[in-house]
Image (tube, helix red, strand yellow):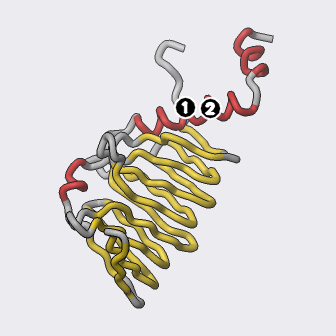
Amino acid sequence: MSHLANALNTLAGQKLHALLLGFAALTLSSNALSLASDKQEKVTWEAAGNSNMTVENGLRTLTLEDSVIVTQGSLRITGDRAIFEYAVESNELNRITVYGSPVGYSQQLSTDGENVAGTSKELRLYSDENTSDSIVELIGDAAISSPDSTMNCAAITYLVDLDLIREAKGPCNGSLSSTSPQGN
């Protein structure tokens, strides 16, 4: 048996999972970053059903029901119910949470039209407090795909600005495009 085969055979489930997650992250991040112009666009929404707004503890919450569509530039989220959380004092949008069966997420990765897409039972969109990077959390039957890879897990945390999966909670499965290194 070759040294590589022996090494692969000795990897335990958790180490193999981490390795596969790393390969998936590298493959997803090999594409161009999400469109930088998306963050400059207004967040828009529409819903076929009721909406209601509450203000409590410095937070204004807008809840939308039925066939909800949220967009910001090329970003598009669809679901059954959405909750927008705004800071009352600054009117800054802190978080969008969307529920559905399933929630759909898509965004253009680059100007040449390549997209990332995902589905889950719940989606959270917010900015990291330290880096201001946009984060999408896909929770419950989470799936994400790019032109080069797919990943299905219990939950996936995706860094939009870096086109990178930061964390995935298993069980997971996926696929990567097969490209061989030059000269081998």
Viewer-side residue, 22 vs 131:
131
Dividing the picture into quadrants, the one containing residue 140 is bottom right
Graded by Cα atoms within 10 Å as few (under 14), some (14 to 19) or many (20 or more), the crowding at tag 2 reads few
The residue under the point 35% across, 82% down is 53
Query: Going by the image, does 68 lie left or right of 132?
Result: right
The residue under the point 46% across, 47% down is 158
Image quarter of the N terminus: top right
**What percent of the width, then of the height, locates residue 49?**
42, 90
Graded by Cα atoms within 10 Å as few (under 14), some (14 to 19) or many (20 or more), the crowding at tag 1 reads some
**What percent of the width, then of the height, locates residue 75?**
33, 60
Look at the picture and state if 51 lies above or below 6.
below
Query: Going by the image, does 110 lie left or right of 28?
Result: left
Label pair 2/1, CB-CB below 8 angstroms: yes
Query: Residue 22 bears which disc, if any?
Result: 1
Q: Which residue is mark 2?
A: 18
Extreme right residue here? 1
Viewer-side residue, 54 vs 31:
54
Extreme top residue here? 3
Look at the picture and state if 106 lies above or below 29.
below
Disc 2 to disc 1, how far (Cα)?
Answer: 6 Å
**What percent of the width, then of the height, locates residue 112?**
28, 48
Look at the picture and state if 20 lies above or below 173.
above
The residue under the point 47% across, 74% down is 79
Extreme front residue here? 57
Viewer-side residue, 60 vs 118:
60
Q: Amino acid at mark 1?
A: Gly
Image quarter of the C terminus: top right
Q: Amino acid at mark 2?
A: Ala
Query: Going by the image, does 1 lie left or right of 102?
Result: right
**What percent of the width, then of the height, locates residue 177?**
54, 37
- Judging from the image, what secondary structure is the residue with disc 2 in? helix
Query: Residue 57 bears which disc, if any?
Result: none
